[in-house]
Structures are given as structure tokens and as C-alpha cells.
Amino acid sequence: VIYYLWENDTSPALVDSIFISGNTVKFDNGVISDTSLDPGDTGNFSISINLPDTLNISYWTKEIKYDMFE
């Protein structure tokens, strides 16, 4: 999950991200992931972002990025 924190202009002032807590899966190529979800599942996450005093954040958006594997 990618968080974008915006000031009044069109450029993000800060960007940060977090992985979800999901299922542990070992893929055929040997990669082990603990952030996998099966279709219909949900995952939990928590993020804490330290904001410098110099920023004046007006709003934030988030984007969920994912890849699907067989």
C-alpha cells in the first residue's frame, strides 16, 4: 500500500509504503512471501509516517499495488 501526502500543489510532498500481513507462500522459484493473499482474503497493515514541521499536508491518497501469480 503506497501513501501519498500532498500539499496544495500537484506534487506529492511525501511518499511512503507498507506491506500487508498475509499468508506465507513459497513459490516455485524459491521465493518466500509473507504478504500473499488468496482471492477474497483481506490483509492487515499499519503505517506511521513522521511529518517534518516544514510540511503543510492538505490531503493524502493511497494506492494498492499488487501482482497476481498462479
Image (tube, helix red, strand yellow):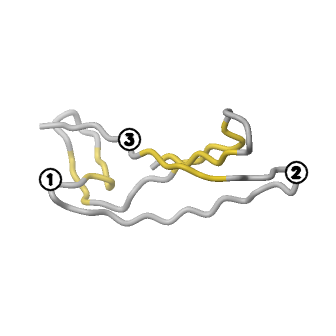
Identify the element where label 1 is drawn: loop
Left or right position of 44 against 67: right
Gap in angstroms between the C-alphas marked 2 and 3: 29 Å
Q: For the residues labelled 1 and 3, say whether their Cβ atoms are less than 8 Å apart.
A: no
Gap in angstroms between the C-alphas marked 1 and 3: 15 Å
Left or right position of 44 against 57: left
Q: Which residue is mark 2?
A: 54
Find residue 30 and report its horizontal and vertical position in percent: 24, 38
What residue type is disc 3 on? Lys
Q: Which residue is mark 3?
A: 65
Judge by depth and name the residue closer to the eye, 29 or 12: 12
Q: Residue furthest right?
A: 54
In which quadrant of the rendered view does residue 34 lie? bottom left
Find residue 39 and report its horizontal and vertical position in percent: 14, 53
Q: Give the mark, 2 or 3, whose residue is nearer the N terminus.
A: 2
What residue type is disc 2 on? Thr
Q: Residue furthest front?
A: 8
Within 10 Å of disc 2 (Cα), the crowding (few <14, some 14-19, many 20+) is few
Total numbered labels placed on residues in the image: 3
Q: Nearer the viewer, mark 2 or mark 3?
A: 2
Residue 14 image label: none
Within 10 Å of disc 3 (Cα), the crowding (few <14, some 14-19, many 20+) is few
Q: Which residue is mark 1?
A: 39
Residue found 53% across the figure and 49% down from its top: 61
Q: Give the mark, 1 or 3, whose residue is nearer the N terminus.
A: 1
Residue found 73% across the figure and 36% down from its top: 9
Q: Give the mark, 1 or 2, whose residue is nearer the N terminus.
A: 1
What residue type is disc 1 on? Pro
